[in-house]
């Protein structure tokens, strides 16, 4: 394998590309289905529109960005708040109302996309230098690691087995073994868990082979038959502001993927296209009762581990997700996957994200002799992780609920804008752009 990674997976052959696609689908599956499990949204629709949303994203970004879009955890609090509005209302389904709110949130992505297009990436990216994006990327991985540990605690032996398989295959494996360590870790630990009676396959036996992934009553189109205007406005007011935080996370994710792959996706195809793709995918999913979408860090971790950067592999994973969304039996088979297996694999993937953030800061040669940089990094990391792991886990401002990562990112952006000494110029400052081998 080239030190620069594999850019064209077709050189590996179709069977190996399919295996790589399955690996990416398995990587995103655990977290993607967890959102509907926690919120009450339909699981099959979630899987369907994760796949369709990813394909739409790739279409709008010219097929250049190896990103997979899965369920966004940032909106979980919003879904809970909208659901609570209907506690004393009988006979009404809250899901379409939440969907309208998420569609409006997706439209904010379109607005920011237009701003990037109108004013140019360089002018807007002045607000997102490495001193901001680096710590944000670090915190993205670290804030997720807690969920990985919780999953590992279900059975540490199974989790450690999954980790061991991934490490051994990636370090000492040859050929295809070295490229699909995540998939092998999942399958290997799953099989061992099943052999020792740790998996209940009852749901798999009872599930049908073919089924529709969503119901009309969960779509926003059902509201055309009549809706409550007050509840609709309240739902929009709850869900729409969340996009202000997730858009910042999107920029951090794009920087993480760029840093991992070694290509400047911020400039080409440009943040205006990636934001547009993310926003449109989110709106599409919400229209049919599925959760809001977001670019998935798990798949970025797979990219970093396997060094196969071809977006075609991601599109294969998306097509597989769409196909299996119509198969309740497969959904049940994946749902039976041991929690510890998901935890062990996720622990590595989340750690890879944070490692990419560290590399982003180090290779950009961010000057920490400057007090402004220390303050910005300290507050981003302190707020992001402090709030995330606090007893409340979020900051509530009226109807708006902000995650720790969102608060940290927003504070970092604001401080970088108002504190003196911001000399970062995207596209002309070699020191600021070289860590991801940007070709500007």
Image (spheres, grey):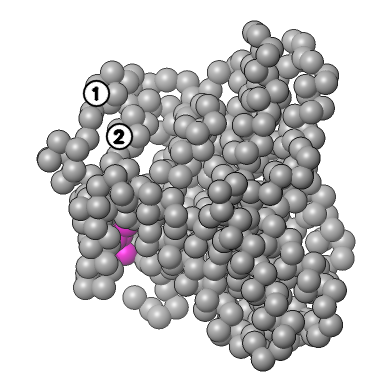
Which residue is nearer to you in this view: 108 or 22? 108
What segment is highlighted magenta in the picture? 178-182
Residue 251 in the image: state x and y as whole percent.
Answer: 67, 62
Q: Pointer 1: what residue?
A: 202
Q: Is residue 71 left or right of residue 431?
A: left
Residue at position x 30%, y 39% in the image? 337
Residue 31 in the image: state x and y as whole percent.
Answer: 45, 45
The vertical placement of 375 against 289, above or below, is below
SS class, disc 1: helix
Q: Is residue 314 left or right of residue 385?
A: left
- The disc, 1 or 2, on the residue closer to the chain's N-terminal end is 1
**180 inside magenta stretch:** yes
Distance from the alpha carbon under mark 1 to that under mark 2: 9 Å
Q: Pointer 2: what residue?
A: 336
Q: How many marks?
A: 2
Residue at position x 78%, y 24% in the image? 232
Which residue is nearer to you in this view: 46 or 19? 46
């Amino acid at each position: 394998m080239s030190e620069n990674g594999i850019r064209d997976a077709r050189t590996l052959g179709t069977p190996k590309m399919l295996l790589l696609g399955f690996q990416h689908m398995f990587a995103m599956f655990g977290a993607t289905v967890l959102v509907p499990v926690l919120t009450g949204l339909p699981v099959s629709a979630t899987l369907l529109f994760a796949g369709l949303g990813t394909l739409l994203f790739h279409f709008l970004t010219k097929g250049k960005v190896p990103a997979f879009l899965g369920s966004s955890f940032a909106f979980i609090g919003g879904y809970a708040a909208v659901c609570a509005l209907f506690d004393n209302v009988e006979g009404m389904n809250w899901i379409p109302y939440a969907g309208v709110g998420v569609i409006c949130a997706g439209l904010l992505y379109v607005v920011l996309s237009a701003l990037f297009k109108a004013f140019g990436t360089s002018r807007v990216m002045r607000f997102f230098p490495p001193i901001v994006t680096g710590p944000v990327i670090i915190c993205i991985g670290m804030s997720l690691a807690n969920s990985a540990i919780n999953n590992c605690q279900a059975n540490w032996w199974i989790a450690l087995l999954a980790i061991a398989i991934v490490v051994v295959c990636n370090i000492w494996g040859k050929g295809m073994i070295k490229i699909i360590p995540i998939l092998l870790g999942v399958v290997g630990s799953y099989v061992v868990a099943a052999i020792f009676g740790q998996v209940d396959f009852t749901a798999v036996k009872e599930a049908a082979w073919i089924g529709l992934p969503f119901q009309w009553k969960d779509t926003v189109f059902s509201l055309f038959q009549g809706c409550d205007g007050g509840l609709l406005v309240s739902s929009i007011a709850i869900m729409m502001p969340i996009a202000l935080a997730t858009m910042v996370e999107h920029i951090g994710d794009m920087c993480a993927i760029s840093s991992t792959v070694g290509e400047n996706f911020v400039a080409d195809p440009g943040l205006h296209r990636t934001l547009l793709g993310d926003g449109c995918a989110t709106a599409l999913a919400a229209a049919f009762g599925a959760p809001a979408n977001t670019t998935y860090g798990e798949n970025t971790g797979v990219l970093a581990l396997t060094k196969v950067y071809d977006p075609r592999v991601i599109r294969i994973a998306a097509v597989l997700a769409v196909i299996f969304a119509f198969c309740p039996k497969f959904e049940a088979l994946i749902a039976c996957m041991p929690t510890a297996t998901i935890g062990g694999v996720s622990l590595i993937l989340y750690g890879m994200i944070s490692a990419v953030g560290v590399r982003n800061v180090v290779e950009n040669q961010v000057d920490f002799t400057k007090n402004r940089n220390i303050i910005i990094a300290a507050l981003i990391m302190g707020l992001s992780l402090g709030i995330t792991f606090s007893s409340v886990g979020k900051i509530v401002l009226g109807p708006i609920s902000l995650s720790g990562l969102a608060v940290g990112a927003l504070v970092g952006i604001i401080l970088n804008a108002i504190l003196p000494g911001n000399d970062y110029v995207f596209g002309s400052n070699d020191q600021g752009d070289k860590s991801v081998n940007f070709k500007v």
